[in-house]
Image: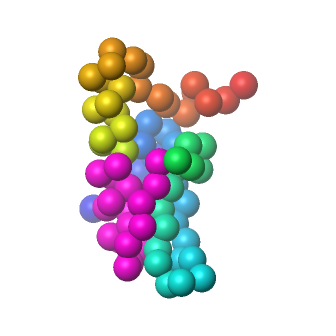
Amino acid sequence: MNPTTDDFNGFSINIFQDEEGDWIAYLVEMPSVSAFADSPQTALNELIVAWEGVKESYRQHGEEIPHLAMTKN
């Protein structure tokens, strides 16, 4: 799987390894949407799951799903 920013509504993705060896993946413009795992690919896969959960929550509450243009001033 090769996700693109389109898969994340235009948001940028950052993946890094923390000092404890875990891999962290998060949306740069929405850092509260994040995931961690023991490999970069697994962290990215978990981020996809997290983002899908965020979008489902917005849908259930009748709110517009965030996209990059909404976060820019």
Residue 22, position as x, y percentages in the image: 47, 78
Is residue 58 rendered magenta in the image?
A: no
Secondary structure mostly seen in the magenta stretch: helix
Is residue 38 rendered magenta in the image?
A: yes
Pick whichever, 12 or 29, lies toward us. Answer: 29
Q: Residue at x 37, y 44 (%)?
A: 51
Pick whichever, 1 or 18, lies toward us. Answer: 18
Left or right: where 62 falls relative to 25: left
Instruction: Give the residues in magenta.
Output: 33-50
Q: Residue at x 60, y 82 (%)?
A: 19
Identify the colour scheme used: rainbow
> In the rendered view, would you say 51 is above or below 45?
above
> In the rendered view, would you say 73 is above or below 13?
above
> In the rendered view, would you say 26 is above or below 7?
below
Q: Residue at x 30, y 23 (%)?
A: 59
Answer yes or no: is residue 12 visible.
no
